[in-house]
Structure formats: C-alpha cells, structure tokens
C-alpha cells in the first residue's frame, strides 16, 4: 500500500483558518482581489525573479567583492589554471590533487578562467554561490509542502550570510547542492524509489567534493525525511520492521561512498585540538545567516524575522514540515556543543546556523493570514530586503577604493619576488579599528581585507606566504625553496612583530619564517596601513618605504 504522498507532505499544521479568512474578506472586494493577486503563480514567479535579480546587484556593481577568503581562492585557482604554463609561477607551486572534501571550486573556477578574465570568472562562480543555496531552499520548501508561498522567496535574506561574506565558496555551493538534492529525494522517493536512490548515490560524492559539511547537511536532510516517514508508522508488525529496514538500507547505500572517501582523505588523519568560543559570541553567531556589515540593521532583520515566526506560531498560523523540524532540532543541538575550530578547520560551528537559516525558509510556512496581514508582511519584508541589499552594495562599492590603492601600491613588486604580508594590531590604534570603513570587517567575526595580499600573485606573479596550500585541504603544493616560507593558516602577521629580537614560540608556530625574515623576503606589505602610527619610520635601518596609499604600504627590505 503506497502512503508516499502523505509522507512527502507530512507536516505539523498549527491551525488553518478558512472561516477567518472568509470573514476578513467579506464585504471587502479589495481584500479578495489582493488575496487573489498574492496567490497567483505569476505573482510568485515575478517576485522570485525580482529577488534573485536583486541578489546580483552587489556582484554587478564591483570588480572584486570584499569577501575575506575570496582573493586567496582566486589566486589558488589562478595557479591551477595558468601556473604550469608560467615560468615564474611554476617555480613556486605545483598542482597536488588528492581526495579532499573541499575542492569543487578548484575543479570549476580554473576552467572558467580559460573562458573569461579571471576576475570575471570569479564573480560568475560567486553568482552560483549565492543562487544555488537560495533556490535550493525554495526547491526544498516546494518538496515539503507541494505549494508556493511568498515566504519561500524570503530565503533571499540568508543568501548574504556571514560565511558567504567571508568567501567560503565551497561551503556555500556544497549546502546549495545538498538542498537541491534533498528536494529531489523528497519529491521522488515514494514515486520512484530506484531513481531516487540511484541519483543520491551519484550526488552524495559530488556534494562531498564540494564540502564535507555539504555532505553532512545532505545526509541530515535526507535522514530527517526518512526518520519522519518512519515516525508515521507504529513499527509493531514484521511488515513494518522490514519496511523500516529497507528504508534504512537505502539511506545507507546512498551515503556510504562519501564515508569511504573521507576515510581515504588526508583530512581524516589531521590531529588538531578543538577550540570553543565564549557563550555570548556563540549566541550572537547563532544569527549569522542574516549578519553583515551593520550590527544595528542586523538586529532589526533578525528581530523582524523572529517576531514574524513567533506571531505565526503563537496565533496558530504556522505550517511546519516534520522532516524540517527534525533537521532544525538536530542542527541547533549540534551547534550548541560544536567547537569553533576542529582538525585545522576554522569557523566550524558557524556553519550550522547558516544551514539553519536556510531551513527556516524551507521548512516553515505561514498560513491563514488575512489580506491586511499578508500585505503588511510582504511590504515590510520587501523593504527590509531592499535595504539589506543596498547596505551590502554600498559597502562593496566603497571597498573598491581599497582594491585600487592596494594594486597601485604593489605595482613595483617584481615577478618571482617574495612578499611578507602583515597587518596592524587592534591594540596599535583601537580608535582607528572602529572608525575604519565598514567594508573592512564583519562585526564580531573577522576583517575582510586579510587576503588582499593575494594580488601580489594575481597582478605581479610574486610569492606571499599566506596562500591556502595545506596538503590536507587544498590541491596545490609549494615548491622548494619557497616551501619554508609557508605560514600556517591564521590571521596575517602583525607588522610590529618584525621588530622583535626574540620571537616567542607561539608566533613561530604560526609564522616559522619570522626567524631571519630579512634574508628570506624581498618586500613587506602592510595592510590597514592607515591605522599604523608613524609607519614611515618603522625599522628605518632594515626597511625602505616605497609606496603608501590608503589601505596599503609597501616596503623594500634592505639587504
């Protein structure tokens, strides 16, 4: 007996109020007409197109978005695309392919760079990073509820989440593919089990190679659906037990290949102690799916969305997918105990609220609102969304001044040279840190300019030690003698550390090249240079200031 359709749309309905809707519309032709307009398929598709188009505005407005890790990923993919054919770059780097759950962008972006200019190719990839998870959340909602809702389009609020603004491209694509894959599983699992399982067997390794968290999210989404299906049955008869065993076996079959791939990957062998953040910061980052450059506006967005959810639930006007509820509960519980870094991977726990943010738009749906409530909600959230995009666009446009200043500052760097990139400590000038342009930091999370030094490779074909080249996580390797200059993935070196005569062991652990740095490098590039007091007279016997403009200052090391 097939019970697939009931399972596919299994949900908790917190009241459906057709009588109240009819009473509110009675005697109000405009209300009935407005309800009809909001319910039309054409209206939904137009709103979807407008939302997706709005998401692209910041990317169209700038050449290089100020996303923390993005320049570094851009440089690495540039090496994979052109490094082997460039006589200077191939002395520094080589491709080092292996089983790594973090290389989807490294497979795609270098090929795009052969079709488009590198910076344009990077923005095309960022478009996918924005749109794939956003549309994936909408597709998953359609699979859960089998209907359209304007609330689904509000998933655009989660598109510019903290991890996207930090340039975590593989993660964004990974969870996007997971959302689409889960939508396909839920949509077709009961109608065509063989096709659904075969598709999952193929898709699961693909998600794995984009990002390990993407695969875990995919497994959780599919597993939550399967668990919700089994909850509908009593499992008291032998038939029910066999039915459950078959579904568990099908789920295991779909997920076993990535599990084996992880066992064979170098990441599985990495041994690094986990670290945790403080409870207040963990509570703050729980909303990182809507955080950006303005803490005050972030608070307004988060409070508005949360208030609307509470209003719908408290007034019995909410529809919640049981599978989504299981998934969200698991994400929240895991987030509370997950460290911020683990196995050399940073911002581990921060990824879970991003998934949870997309799930709120996928697994929850308001219903039973009258015409006035629906109109007010649509208008308010539309204005809020437009303001959010405008704030991000403004920050990105202003960031291009920093990019221009940096590229002009490094114009004298010679190909094949070695550039030590450094930053200015917060303690050197606390006032400047809080007064610097909004585009340079994500409040309480991280600066966005840390990897701008990547342009010494992109523009000047020079080496700098902070490129992402860890053997357990990246598909490139640094050649000798440059290998000794590699830095452990960490924030940039503080420029004042160069003046230390006795380098502490903790610093050497992250920056092993600090001992005898004057003999190992040709230039020193200081970022956020406006915050450095009296930079012109820093180590005058060892450094010669060549150029200083805005965010950047370039020194030549005196030999």
Image: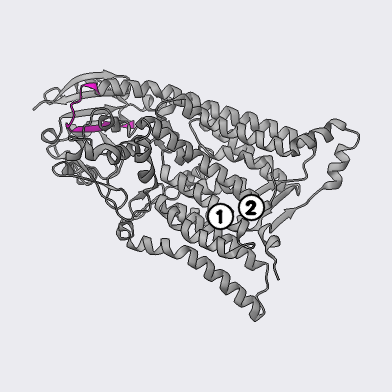
The crowd level at tag 2 (other Cα within 10 Å; few <14, some 14-19, many 20+) is many
Instruction: Give the distance between the C-alpha atoms of the residues marked 2 and 1, in whole angstroms.
Output: 9 Å
Q: Quadrant of residue 303?
A: top right
Q: Residue 182 has which mark?
A: 1
For residue 470, above or below residue 292: below
Q: Is residue 440 left or right of residue 294?
A: left
Residue in the image at 13% along x and 36% along y: 520
Which quadrant holds the C terminus? Answer: top left
Question: Is residue 265 or residue 199 the one in the foreground?
Answer: 199
Which residue lies under the disc numbered 2? 143
Q: Position of residue 38 (x, y in %)?
A: 74, 36
State which region is magenta.
Answer: 411-426
Which residue extends farthest bottom?
A: 238
Q: Are marks 2 and 1 in contact (CB under 8 Å)?
A: yes
Question: Is residue 293 or residue 416 the one in the foreground?
Answer: 416
Badge 1 element: helix
Q: Does the magenta segment cover residue 461?
A: no
């Amino acid at each position: 007996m097939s019970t697939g359709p009931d399972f596919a749309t299994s949900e908790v309905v917190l009241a459906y109020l057709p009588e109240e809707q009819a009473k509110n519309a009675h005697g109000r032709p405009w209300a009935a007409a407005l309800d009809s307009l909001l319910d039309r398929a054409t209206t939904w598709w137009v709103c979807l197109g407008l939302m997706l188009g709005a998401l692209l505005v910041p990317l169209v407005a700038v050449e290089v978005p100020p996303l923390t890790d993005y320049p570094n990923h851009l440089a690495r993919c540039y090496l994979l695309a052109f490094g082997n054919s460039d006589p200077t770059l191939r002395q520094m780097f080589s491709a080092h392919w292996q089983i790594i759950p973090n290389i989807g962008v490294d497979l795609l972006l270098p090929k795009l760079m052969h079709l488009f200019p590198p910076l344009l190719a990077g923005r095309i990839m960022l478009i996918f990073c924005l749109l794939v998870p956003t549309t994936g959340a909408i597709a998953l909602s359609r699979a859960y509820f089998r209907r359209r809702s304007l609330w689904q389009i509000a998933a655009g609020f989660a598109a510019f989440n903290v991890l996207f603004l930090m340039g975590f491209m593989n993660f964004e694509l990974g969870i996007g593919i997971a959302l689409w894959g889960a939508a396909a599983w839920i949509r077709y699992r009961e109608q065509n089990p063989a096709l659904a399982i075969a598709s999952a067997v193929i898709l699961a390794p693909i998600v794995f190679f984009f990002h390990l968290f993407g695969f875990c999210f995919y497994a959780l989404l599919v597993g939550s659906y399967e668990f919700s299906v089994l909850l509908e049955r009593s499992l008291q008869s032998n038939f029910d037990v066999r039915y459950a065993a078959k579904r568990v076996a099908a789920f295991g079959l779909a997920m076993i290949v990535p599990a084996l791939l992880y066992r064979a990957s170098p990441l599985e062998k990495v041994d690094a102690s986990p670290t945790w953040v403080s409870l207040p910061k963990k509570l703050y980052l729980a909303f990182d799916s809507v955080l950006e450059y303005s803490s005050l506006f972030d608070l307004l967005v988060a409070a508005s969305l949360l208030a609307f959810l509470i209003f719908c639930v408290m007034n019995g006007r909410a529809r919640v997918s049981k599978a989504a509820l299981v998934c969200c509960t698991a994400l929240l519980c895991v987030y509370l105990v997950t460290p911020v870094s683990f196995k050399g991977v940073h911002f581990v726990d921060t990824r879970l609220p991003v998934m949870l943010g997309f799930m709120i738009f996928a697994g929850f749906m308001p219903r039973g609102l009258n015409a006035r409530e629906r109109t007010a909600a649509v208008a308010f959230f539309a204005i809020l969304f437009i303001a959010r995009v405008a704030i991000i666009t403004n920050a990105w446009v202003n960031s291009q001044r920093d990019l221009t200043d940096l590229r002009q500052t490094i114009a004298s760097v010679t190909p094949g040279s070695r550039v030590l990139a450094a930053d200015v400590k917060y303690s050197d000038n606390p006032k400047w840190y809080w007064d610097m342009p909004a585009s340079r930091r994500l409040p309480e999370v991280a600066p966005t300019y840390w990897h701008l030094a990547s342009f010494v490779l992109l523009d000047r074909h020079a080496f700098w030690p902070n490129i992402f080249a860890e053997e357990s996580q990246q598909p490139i390797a640094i050649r000798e003698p440059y290998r000794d200059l590699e830095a452990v993935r960490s924030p940039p070196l503080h420029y004042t550390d160069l003046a230390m005569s006795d380098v502490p062991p903790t610093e050497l652990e992250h920056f092993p090249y600090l001992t005898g740095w004057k003999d190992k490098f040709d230039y020193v590039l200081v970022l956020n240079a406006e915050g450095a007091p009296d930079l012109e007279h820093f180590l005058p016997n060892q450094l010669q200031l060549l150029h200083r403009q805005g965010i950047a200052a370039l020194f030549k090391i005196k030999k």
